Image (spheres, rainbow, N blue to C red):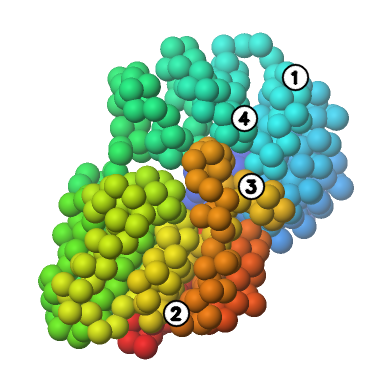
């Protein structure tokens, strides 16, 4: 810093804080380095170091700097909120909660802390604690939308379709801004069609941009591509031969060390268009999408999850299959039942759908049959692979037992509206794959892939671990449900196609 013109500490820090807020981190490190020694132990300076490290992706360093700032006397709400966010990023749930509670002890009724603590309790399924936090929020118009969102989320947690409908009706009627509505598309599909159409009409008239998030099919890779996720845009670019553009898009979207390495690696290993031995399928959104007949004698049946995809658009998967020259049939779970309810486009029930799929397989002159299923589609893939006498099935992050008792035992709270409907609709034996896998006696090889750090998926895989023919493939350090991109990136999917 120049000895001639020396700004005040306040002016100096405001400049640094403005750059951090803008995300313009390049000059910040230099400004911090040039800060006079006499200012470097001040809480505000230490807090800026914490924010810079947090924005740069250095969570451990940020936590250390936050602690130093608090020890030096930093006591504003912002420093506690930053500390909470660092704990959240580090996956330290208990510390995140305790930090927010400590903040509320010093700043009773702080709405930001109360809202974040409410959402945390909802995530932990602690509905009573969530309601208690909401009760402490000020009764102001700007809090009304958040309260409506909480009512919706509690109804989803309880699997209460009537409560969901009431909450969405209230939101459509009275919300000033669109509140957070997790799982909305899937939730709407659990509501009877007439009422669902009414709600969709109300919500999309009020918030037109919502239509892209709740369309009945989420299959499209190319339609309205500019409104698709960065991952889908990157995959579309890669399929069009623009791999570098795809990689650059991901780097811009996931900066500061938050890169989606699975998607990036998957794009890197995408077979070139010139390698195709048959045309790639065009996904028209149908319930059953079949490729042209391949010449290898191998047919792959792909069972999608509840989002009508196989953890990615099916065109992307098909590039790998077309490069091998295999025949493929992509099947959507229209009944949202893990295919227990069959495929209505093929037949009225499971047995009829099974017969229709068997005929499709025969029409391809199949000598070797493979099955692939992702998420809840993996449940259907395993069952169909056994029934159709497939050689092998790859199930990515698949549930293996969806009985109410098992889900409670492993604390699996996902898709509660779907689970409650399944428990009402189908007999107990159709919800548990173990008896069928045991009875198959290893005739069909079952490969279960899952993130080693995703505890619920781990428990589902372990449930079948002692069965003949079952092999477990935990993906090291993966804590998310979306495992197929990592399977593809590792080369295991191409190996599966050629076994």
Q: Position of residue 424 (x, y in %)?
A: 54, 38
Q: Earlier in the sequence, mark 3 or mark 2?
A: 3
Q: Which residue is mark 2?
A: 444
Secondary structure type for disc 4: helix
Residue 154: assigned label: 4
Q: What is the spatial separation of the Cα atoms under label 3 and label 1, in whole angstroms? A: 34 Å
Residue 328: assigned label: none
Q: Which residue is mark 1?
A: 136
**Label 1 neighbour load within 10 Å: few <14, some 14-19, many 20+:** some
Contact, mark 4 vs mark 1 (Cβ under 8 Å): no
Q: Earlier in the sequence, mark 3 or mark 1?
A: 1
- Which residue is painted at 66% across and 36% down in the image? 122
Q: What is the spatial separation of the Cα atoms under label 2 and label 4, in whole angstroms? A: 41 Å
Secondary structure type for disc 2: loop
Q: What is the spatial separation of the Cα atoms under label 4 and label 3, in whole angstroms? A: 19 Å
Residue 404: assigned label: 3
Q: Earlier in the sequence, mark 4 or mark 3?
A: 4
Secondary structure type for disc 3: helix
Q: Position of residue 233 (x, y in %)?
A: 29, 56
Q: What is the spatial separation of the Cα atoms under label 4 and label 1, in whole angstroms? A: 17 Å
Residue 489 in sight in this render: no
- In the rendered view of the protein, which quadrant contains the N terminus? bottom right
Contact, mark 3 vs mark 2 (Cβ under 8 Å): no
Residue 261 horizontal side relative to residue 153, left or right: left
**Label 3 neighbour load within 10 Å: few <14, some 14-19, many 20+:** some
Q: Quadrant of residue 492?
A: bottom left
Above or below residue 382? Residue 287 is above
- Which residue is painted at 41% across and 46% down in the image? 336
């Amino acid at each position: 810093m120049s000895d001639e013109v020396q700004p005040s500490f306040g002016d100096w820090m405001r400049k640094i804080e403005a750059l951090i807020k803008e995300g313009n981190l390049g000059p910040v490190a230099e400004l911090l380095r040039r800060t006079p020694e006499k200012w470097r132990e001040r809480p505000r300076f230490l807090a800026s170091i914490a924010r810079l490290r947090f924005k740069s992706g250095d969570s451990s360093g940020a936590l250390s700097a936050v602690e130093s700032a608090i020890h030096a006397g930093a006591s504003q709400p912002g420093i506690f909120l930053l500390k909470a966010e660092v704990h959240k990023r580090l996956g330290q749930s208990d510390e995140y909660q305790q930090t927010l509670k400590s903040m509320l002890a010093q700043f009773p009724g702080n709405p930001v802390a109360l809202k974040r603590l409410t959402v945390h309790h909802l995530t932990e399924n602690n509905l009573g604690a969530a309601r208690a936090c909401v009760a402490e929020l000020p009764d102001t118009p700007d809090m009304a939308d958040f309260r409506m969102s909480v009512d919706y989320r509690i109804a989803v947690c309880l699997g209460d379709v009537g409560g969901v409908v009431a909450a969405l009706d209230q939101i459509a009627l009275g919300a000033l801004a669109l509140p957070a509505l997790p799982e909305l598309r899937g939730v709407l599909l659990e509501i009877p069609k007439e009422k669902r159409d009414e709600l969709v009409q109300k919500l999309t008239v009020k918030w037109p941009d919502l239509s892209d998030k709740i369309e009945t099919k989420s299959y499209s890779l190319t339609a309205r591509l500019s409104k698709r996720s960065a991952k889908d845009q990157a995959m579309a670019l890669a399929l069009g031969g623009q791999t570098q553009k795809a990689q650059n898009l991901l780097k811009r979207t996931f900066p500061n060390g938050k890169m989606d390495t699975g998607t990036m690696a998957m794009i890197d290993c995408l077979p070139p268009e010139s390698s195709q031995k048959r045309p790639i399928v065009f996904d028209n959104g149908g319930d059953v999408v079949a490729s042209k007949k391949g010449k290898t004698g191998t047919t792959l049946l792909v069972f999608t999850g509840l989002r009508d995809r196989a953890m990615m658009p099916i065109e992307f998967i098909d590039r790998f299959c077309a490069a091998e020259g295999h025949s493929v049939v992509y099947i959507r779970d229209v009944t949202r039942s893990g295919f227990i309810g069959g495929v209505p486009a093929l037949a009225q029930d499971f047995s009829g759908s099974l017969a229709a799929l068997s005929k499709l397989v025969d029409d391809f002159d199949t000598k070797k049959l493979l099955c692939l299923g992702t998420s809840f589609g993996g449940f259907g893939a395993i069952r169909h692979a056994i029934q159709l006498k497939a050689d092998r099935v790859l199930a990515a992050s698949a549930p293996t037992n969806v009985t109410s008792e098992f889900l409670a035992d492993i604390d699996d709270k996902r898709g509660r509206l779907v689970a409650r409907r399944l428990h009402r609709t189908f007999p107990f034996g159709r919800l548990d794959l173990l008896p069928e896998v045991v009875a198959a006696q290893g005739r069909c090889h079952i490969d279960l892939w899952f993130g080693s750090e995703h505890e619920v998926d781990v428990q589902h895989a372990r449930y079948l671990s002692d069965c003949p023919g079952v092999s477990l493939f935990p993906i090291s350090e993966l804590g998310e449900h979306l495992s197929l991109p990592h399977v593809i990136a590792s080369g295991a999917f191409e190996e599966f196609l050629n076994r």
